[in-house]
Image (cartoon, helix red, strand yellow):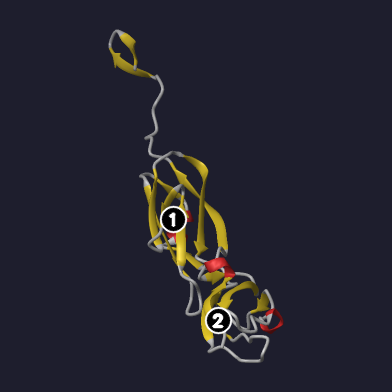
Amino acid sequence: KPVIKKVVLNGGQPYTSKTTVSVNIEAEDQPNLSGLDETSFPNKIIGLGREGENVISVKVKDKAGNESSPMTASVILDTTPPRITVKDLDRITYGWHKTDVSITVEASDGIFGSGVREVSCYGVTSSSGSVTATIREEGRNIRVPYYAVDQAGNSINNYFEVKIDKTPPSIGSFEIVTYHLDAKGITAGFFTL
């Protein structure tokens, strides 16, 4: 009776965004018997049925027709990008800010997802599913990119813009003119600031 030693799906990667994966089987028959019937092996590429965990059960036969016990392997199919949320986006993108702006981006991958591998905002990256970045530069329409990637490699990216002006206005030089009227006439005084 043949024995399956190992079944490897998707090159051993537990997650995939592709609807087909490779199947590699290591099996053997006892020495001096009929040997494995290679035609009984499943296709080298198989299609996955649905989002989430897909379990494959494999059996092989020897040339005499004896069948092995089944062995299972699984892979998680995830073709959907993670969901990403910028906390307080309306407040952040509305009007001018006069201080640094802190931004929190959160990502999740849904019930059948493979899980968030990385989330990033303005160059700050985290594997926890949430990241906070602080924008310190000043300017009009500062572009703030953000993205998330799940374990299967699906990604989503976007950006928004903020306006920050932390510099108080300055007053250039000006003159103050004062006039004094008395019995001798009008006297003017000039001061430059």
Mark 2 crowd level (few <14, some 14–19, many ≥20, 10 Å Cα) = few
Mark 2 or 1: in front is 2
Nearer the observer, 81 or 58: 58
Q: Quadrant of the C terminus?
A: top left
Above or below 51: residue 14: above
- Residue 30 circle label: 2
Nearer the observer, 27 or 122: 27
Above or below 46: residue 172: above
- Residue 92 circle label: 1
Q: Quadrant of residue 9?
A: bottom right
- Residue 185 circle label: none
Task: Please name the residue shown 39% across and 41% down the image.
Answer: 136
> Amino acid type of disc 1?
Ile
Residue 180 pos. (x, y %): 30, 16
Q: Is residue 163 visible?
A: yes
Q: Is residue 54 visible?
A: no
> Amino acid type of disc 2?
Gln
Residue 75 pos. (x, y %): 53, 76
> Residue reaching furthest top?
184
* Local SS, label 2: loop
Task: Please name the residue shown 46% across and 53% down the image.
Answer: 121
Task: Please name the residue shown 64% across and 81% down the image.
Answer: 35
Q: Earlier in the sequence, mark 2 or mark 1?
A: 2
Q: Quadrant of residue 108?
A: bottom left
Residue 176 pos. (x, y %): 35, 19
Q: CB atoms at circles 2 and 1 under 8 Å apart?
A: no
Task: Please name the residue shown 48% across and 76% down the image.
Answer: 110
Residue 11 pos. (x, y %): 57, 66
